[in-house]
Image (cartoon, helix red, strand yellow):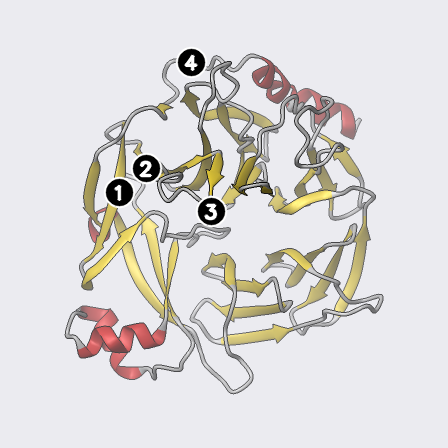
Amino acid sequence: MKRNLLFIGLWSILLLSCNEQPPQSIPQIDLSIEYPEREVYLQDVATVSYLPLETTDEFIFKGYFVDISPEGLASYHRKDGDIFLFDGQGKALLTMNHRGGGPNEYTEVKKVSVDWNKQEIYVLDVKKHILIYDFTGKHVRTIDFQHETRHTDMYPYGANHFILSKEIPEGINAETIRPYRPLLLLSRTDEQVDSLPYIKRENVFMTAYMGEMKGIAQQGILRSFHGETYLNDIASDTIFHLNAKSNQSTPLLTRTPSILAKDDTPYVLTLEGVTPRYIFLKKQIKDHNLEDPNSAKGNRFIAYDRWSQEFFQPIFKNKDNLEQTINNKDLSQCEGEWGSHLVLEAFHLKEALEEESLNGELKNIAERIDEEDNPVVMIMKFHNK
């Protein structure tokens, strides 16, 4: 019954993937157009606050955040395997590293997720399992599954599931693939794995090459911002929002020209963030010639303003530091109610303080910290009306 309900509820994903002609009301970005630049003061479109992270001798922050919310902040460093937790006021809660070859250790961290209510940390290992630890760093249990999943593609999906994406059976650099279902729903309770009905029929990948040497860039198909999940398959002309409650998919945005056009389409489109007002996007060259300095000249970070229904290249300004210019490539988005953020290194803030370019709360914080302290997190809660 469970599988049948999932199949019925998510059937719309399959239908939309077969016929990508959404209603005209869905915004469509034209990647052949050069959209204008526009300066926006962050304080005019968002509530901006600053959160200094506590610094201790054992707690030197590194890595990037995967969750920022009133309950707390979570981050990890993929290379070293360090995982950090802070509470909602920036106080250090936990630093742990269980990288190793033991049964309760991870070989390499692919993704980290946190359940603040259950006080559990979920670590997607390079091997086919998820290790679960409590907030003291103690191993609780391990969920095993026999699927090769895409790098970093693991996000909470509803209260009791994770959504993951399965690797292309033929490999990421396969020109032609057999149609398959890449979306997996993993139950946290009974560990059952279901395949959702979305069918991936084409493969598009980004390359970087220099002479005879060629590298393939992985591109995950899942995105999650502020607790919402999105399907961003660069081989598709449509980006979808996935509703974890109703298991329905809704087109968020489409692109033209088609990525599958017969003539060479040079750009891929990736979803970089979603806020109540803006949809952040990246237009990126598909094949990058490292010997040509102009090869990636057309790459652009673009925002869609849902209020004005316009596409533009945003240049964000911070009234607390007028010397600071922020493109949406600098803004980070992640899980949690406070997902929009920017990490401000302490030594940069001290330099800005000496140059007398800081104002307000940010200036007060910079006066109190040392240049070797943990960073200050700039949190932006974008307005919804």
Which residue is most to the bottom?
57
**Amino acid marked by disc 1:** Pro
Front residue of 213/192: it is: 213
Quadrant hosting residue 140: bottom right
In the image, taking residue 97 as reference, residue 59 lies left or right, namely: left
Residue 278 seen by the camera: no
In the image, taking residue 8 as reference, residue 311 lies left or right, namely: left
Q: Residue at x 79, y 50 (%)?
A: 128
The alpha-carbon separation of the residues under discs 1 and 3 comes to: 21 Å
Check disc 1 and report the residue beneath it: 314
Check disc 4 and report the residue beneath it: 23
The alpha-carbon separation of the residues under discs 2 and 3 comes to: 17 Å
Secondary structure at badge 2 equals strand
Check disc 3 and report the residue beneath it: 226
Q: Position of residue 92 (x, y in %)?
A: 51, 76
User: Within 10 Å of the Cα at label 3, are there few (<14), some (14-19), or many (20+) other Cα atoms?
Assistant: many
Q: Position of residue 381 (x, y in %)?
A: 34, 51
